[in-house]
């Protein structure tokens, strides 16, 4: 599930309110360090809640269409069509 833009994997015995609380708390902590929270894993170990947080990756996928390097979301309709018409090759 996603809560406030963060992917959350949580133990099913945790309530939605508890999960939202932990997401908000972790986001504040990460933002104070000028970092972006990407994923939060909430597990249980007896009575303890185990929190594992992962930073959002700054990696973007760039494609080359007709000599231009750009992210897919910046392509105009013609470039999107050209990208969709490409043959996909698989190496086995």
Image (cartoon, rainbow, N blue to C red):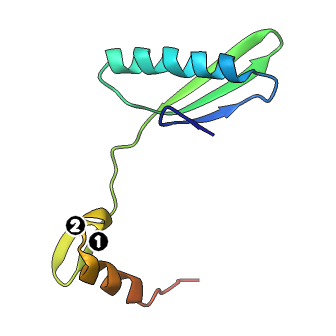
Query: Which element is circle 1 on?
Result: strand
Quarter that holds the N terminus:
top right
Q: In the displayed structure, would residue 80 be above or below residue 17?
A: below
Q: Residue 79: where, in percent of width, then height?
A: 26, 80
Taking the spot 72% from the left edge, 24% from the top edge, the residue there is: 43
Q: Are marks 1 and 2 in contact (CB under 8 Å)?
A: yes
The part of the image, by quadrant, that contains residue 46 is: top right
Q: Secondary structure at mark 2?
A: strand
Q: Quadrant of residue 60?
A: bottom left
Residue 57, x across and y down, in percent: 39, 43
Please state the horizontal and vertical placement of residue 88, each as a whole percent of the image.
47, 86
Answer above or below: position of 87 versus 18: below
- For the view shown, which residue lies furthest in the left direction? 67
Q: Residue at x 50, y 14 (%)?
A: 25
Give the residue displayed 80% in from the left and 9% down from the top: 47
Residue sitting at x 38%, y 30%: 36
Pick the front one: 17 or 83 = 17
Q: Real-space Cα distance between discs 1 and 2?
A: 6 Å
Q: Quadrant of residue 2?
A: top right
Left or right of residue 9: residue 64 = left
**Label number found at residue 70:** 2
Other residues around mark 2 within 10 Å, as few (<14) / some (14–19) / many (≥20): some
Residue indicated by mark 1: 63
Relative placement, left or right, of 53 versus 43 is: left
Q: Is residue 13 above or below residue 47?
A: below
Total labels drawn: 2
Q: Earlier in the sequence, mark 1 or mark 2?
A: 1
Crowding near the residue tagged with mark 1, few <14, some 14–19, many ≥20 C-alpha atoms within 10 Å: some
Q: Which mark is residue 26?
A: none
Quadrant containing the C terminus is bottom right
């Amino acid at each position: 599930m996603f809560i406030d833009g963060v992917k959350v994997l949580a133990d099913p015995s945790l309530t939605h309110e508890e999960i939202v609380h932990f997401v908000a708390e972790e986001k504040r902590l990460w933002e104070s360090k000028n970092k972006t929270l990407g994923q939060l894993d909430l597990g249980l170990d007896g009575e303890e809640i185990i929190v594992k947080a992962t930073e959002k990756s700054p990696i973007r996928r760039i494609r080359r269409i007709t000599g231009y390097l750009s992210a897919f979301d910046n392509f105009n309709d013609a470039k999107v069509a050209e990208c969709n018409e490409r043959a996909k090759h698989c190496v086995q």
